[in-house]
Amino acid sequence: MTAVSERPTGFDPYAERPPASRVRFLYGVNPLAKLAGPAPAMVLLVFVRDAATPLAFLAFAYAILLVGVTFTRRLALMLFAAVPLGVAAIGVGFSLWTDPSRVDQSVIVLQIGSWTLYGGMLQIGFATALRLAAIVALSLIAGLSTTGPDLARSMVQQLRVPYRIGYTALAAFRFVPRFGHELDVIRRAHRVRGAHGGRGPFSAIARWAGYVVPLLAGAIRHAERVALAMDARAFGAYPDRTERHLVPWRIRDTVFVILFCAVSAALFWILFPWGLS
């Protein structure tokens, strides 16, 4: 009878990548391809001023996310509740800040005393909000389907970034889950010893202040272990290193970038926001 060892789930979520799904194709695309495809559209969206163009790119990004990533309740809540609420809040906010003397005043939406909210102000405010939402949605194509370590590995392997920089960033990414694990251990130890500090806002501040010193000590110990491990593996002694985890650039990555840029160019060509007066 063989014993099955279990690894702590919160210790290092980046130790192994989940297998790429054939249906949710974005997990199998190179991280650089998921950045290179939306990047031109994200840059050009900064310079558009209409509402139709960012709305079209927002729908395009949502369509890719619906097909390309695995949906969870939190992700669905973010995309279909948080983003629309954010667009509404930012749109109203920018509308209120817009100079009424520089907009179309033919339509009056709201009038309170001497202050008037014109339709042109709402148009500019919501166009700005939709532009920001479209840029965020396009960035989520890579953000929701890529881990930081995979991005660092692809930069080293494809962009020829020196591995001293890339794997230093990789070690930094691994510090984040490590800090979460250390904080959880410290909090449990405080509960076992009855050092919860009572209730109330001041007790919470004192309790969190008590986490700082042991968390800092744990971070220093972890940094020393990482430095010793790097020295033991001759990190930085040679210009190149053998890659353990490969993140290759495949034909499908080139196809993804070409198709994404082609659809983006078609949307800009059809809508042509710079031709508006």
Image (cartoon, grey):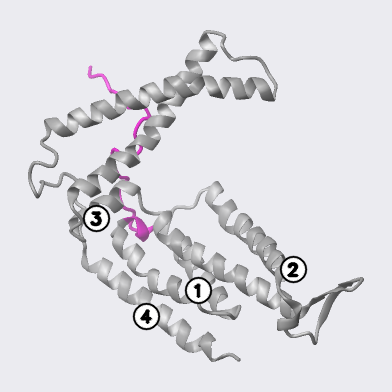
Mark 4 — residue?
262
Which residue type does callout 1 highlight? Val
Q: Secondary structure beneath disc 2?
A: helix
- The answer to whether mark 1 and mark 3 are in CB contact below 8 A is no
The location of residue 31, given as percent across then percent down, is: 31, 58
Q: Answer with mark 1 or mark 3, whichever residue precedes in sequence.
A: 1
Q: What is the spatial separation of the Cα atoms under label 1 and label 3, in whole angstroms? A: 27 Å
Q: Earlier in the sequence, mark 2 or mark 1?
A: 1
Q: Amino acid at mark 3?
A: Ser
Q: Earlier in the sequence, mark 2 or mark 3?
A: 2
Q: Which residue is mark 3?
A: 154
Per the rendered image, the range of residues in magenta is: 1-27
Whether the residues at callouts 2 and 1 have beta carbons within 8 Å, the answer is: no
Report the residue marked by disc 2. 96
In depth, the one of 49 and 189 nearer the eye is 49
Q: Does the stretch in magenta take in 130?
A: no
Q: Is residue 14 visible in the rendered structure shown here?
A: no
Vertically, is 187 above or below 134?
above
